[in-house]
Image (cartoon, helix red, strand yellow):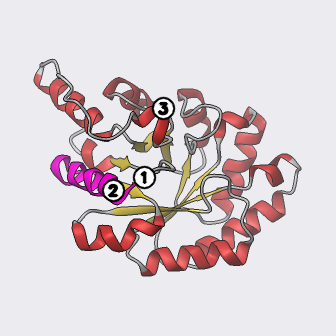
Amino acid sequence: MDDIPDRIEHTVLGPTTTPDDVRTCLDEALQYGMRACIPPWALPLATEYANVQLTAVIDFPHGQGQTDSVCQAAKLAWDAGADELDMVCNIGLLKAGEDDAVRNHITEVVASVPVPVKVIVEAPLLSDDELERVGQLVADADAAYLKTATGFSEGGATVHDVEILSKYLPVKASGGVGSWADAQAMFEAGAERIGASSGDTIVREWQAATEGETVTEPERDRDDPDTTDGY
């Protein structure tokens, strides 16, 4: 697993996220060779500040926007420099059995931009049968990835959910992945990417584990990521 840092999307998405928080996230992404996942408003800042692969979230965190508006948001984020996009599935429609509406919505958003789109399915809110359904729907919509959770709902990534979703598309495991042990379990379950506000911690712990050392965590400048960033 020599490519671990490139498989981590270091994340800052909390409701109180400031420009300085975004710069700190980008500094850490650069330092450790990670990608970054940021709010769309921060894309102009980020593209000028650092040469980092950028994911922007759209229709986040509830996924309840109209299709035209979400497509427009996707185009604006791409125009502003996003290399990838993370959109949120409309879980209410999924639970109502409106599978065609879910699939068609995602299909239109995916087709609106020439960059990979990951679809956040909020796995903690879904049954296994619903996970299977949404996995197939997102694959049929030509999305690039399935993503487990926003981190702003009832829980985050689990090995069980990753194992189910990885049958359909590559998976980005996000929500509550705060250590190398957590990340390793997700990779072993089939995840291709990790989304985490503790990406720097994950990489440091991975480096220490490969070198047989014990990592000592520095104090963080940002607020506790488990409560502010959703990841």
Labelled pair 2, 1 in contact (Cβ < 8 Å): yes
Residue 30, relative to residue 194: is it above or below? Answer: below
Residue at image mark 3: 176
Residue 16 shown left or right of residue 214 in the figure: right
Q: Main secondary structure of the magenta part?
A: helix
Residue at image mark 2: 22
Foreground residue among 35 and 44: 44
Residue 142, relative to residue 183: is it above or below? Answer: below
Residue at image mark 1: 17
The quarter of the picture where residue 43 lies is: bottom left
Q: Residues within 10 Å of mark 1 (few under 14, many from 20)?
A: some
Foreground residue among 123 and 139: 123
CA distance separating discs 3 and 2:
20 Å
Element at badge 3?
loop
Element at badge 1?
loop
- Total numbered circles: 3
Element at badge 2?
helix
Which residues are the magenta region?
A: 18-35
Under mark 1, the amino acid is Thr
Q: Position of residue 231 (x, y in %)?
A: 47, 40
Residue 97 lies in the magenta stretch: no
Residue 106 shown left or right of residue 186 in the figure: right
Residue 100 shown left or right of residue 206 in the figure: right
